[in-house]
Amino acid sequence: MDLGHIDLNLLRVLDVIFEERNLVRAGLRLHLSQSAVSHALGRLRESLGDELFVRTGKGLEPTARALLLAPQLREALSRIEQSLGVQPFDPRSSTRRFVIAANDHITAVFVAKLSQRLEKQAPAISLVILPSTRLDLAEQIDVGRIDLAIGVFAQVPPRLQSQTVATLTEVLVMRKGHPAGRRRLTLAELGRYPLLTISVGGNEDGAISGFIVERGLARQSEMFNRPALEDALASAGVKPNFRVTVPHSLSIPSLLVDSDMISIVPATLAREFASANTVLVRELPYRAEGAVLRAVWHRRNEHDPACAWLRDEVRKAALS
């Protein structure tokens, strides 16, 4: 095939359509109208002699030819970008604006440490924190409106990259003076007290086993290991008493005041509560596997020096 007969700009369009499987979203990414993207796809089909994508009830599905082309095309585009070179990133002089998606727990614990680091090392850089609980999180990452999402993800699609930030273990928190605070609880005792839990979505929002799946990205909807709790209590012949469920973790201390409720939260969050001298922190009377906290970003930002720097700062903040 003679490359002279192909507009190389169309290859970028093909790459984005393959990721998005939707002409409207591809247009947003490319800053083109839907009709312009459709016209570009038509030219690609004519040049390559293949339909490339067919419409289905789930969107555009790639043909066998497109599936063969896509990984090689992405690698070729990455090499071209690296060959052209990029300007070195200087955090001390940069005025870059980064958008991070995180829930209130991550913001209070990890983003707070990140902000402290940036204040000293990158005084002109600004951070915008958006709620990671939004239902269009994956789409916002795809279209480039979110640089980094920090959270617990059970599944990350191939178009996104991720790195481990920390492992979150669970503990119990209760008000000071709580009758269960004198010693470690047994499972039977835990079953007798009402529970205060954190959830940002249930079955009605499409959550399955504590996670909401959107465009291949499975994000945590419940901030505790429900199966571990239910299995442990079942072994003791009791059922959990879910009294109150809230979407915001920072409301926990105020809800525990003058209440015998007990809450199950990440240990990192419990330490923040305890530092304010508002709650008691106790170990779980059962085993619960720790949740892996990850930073997730789009693959196109893998070699962006500014984004790479931000990811490294997030990692260092989590270790501090």
Image (tube, grey):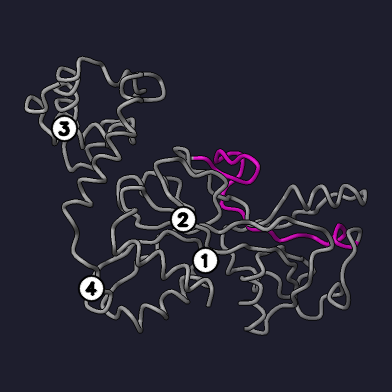
The answer to whether the residues at label 1 and label 4 have Cβ atoms under 8 Å apart is: no
Marks 3 and 4, Cα distance to the nearest angstrom?
32 Å
Which label was assigned to residue 81? none
Q: What stretch is highlighted in magenta?
A: 189-213
Between the residue at mark 3 and the residue at mark 1, the CA separation in whole angstroms equals 40 Å
Residue shown at 35%/57% (left/top)? Answer: 147
Report which residue position mark 4 lands on: 94
| Cβ–Cβ under 8 Å for marks 2 and 1 | yes
191 part of magenta stretch? yes
Residue 262, percent from left and from top: 76, 66
**Residue with the most extreme left position:** 4
Disc 1 marks which residue? Answer: 106
Q: Identify the residue at horizontal 26%, vertical 36% (top origin).
A: 26
Residue 251, percent from left and from top: 60, 68
Q: Distance between the residues labelled 4 and 2?
A: 26 Å
- Dot 1 or dot 4, earlier in sequence: 4
Disc 1 and disc 4: Cα gap in Å? 25 Å
Which residue is depicted at the point 87% across and 71% down? Answer: 184
Q: In this view, does 273 lie above or below 196?
A: below
Q: Is residue 206 or residue 311 the one in the foreground?
A: 311
Which is more foreground, mark 4 or mark 2? 4
Where is mark 2, residue-wise? 132
Disc nearer the start of the sequence (2/1): 1
Disc 4 is placed on an element classified as loop
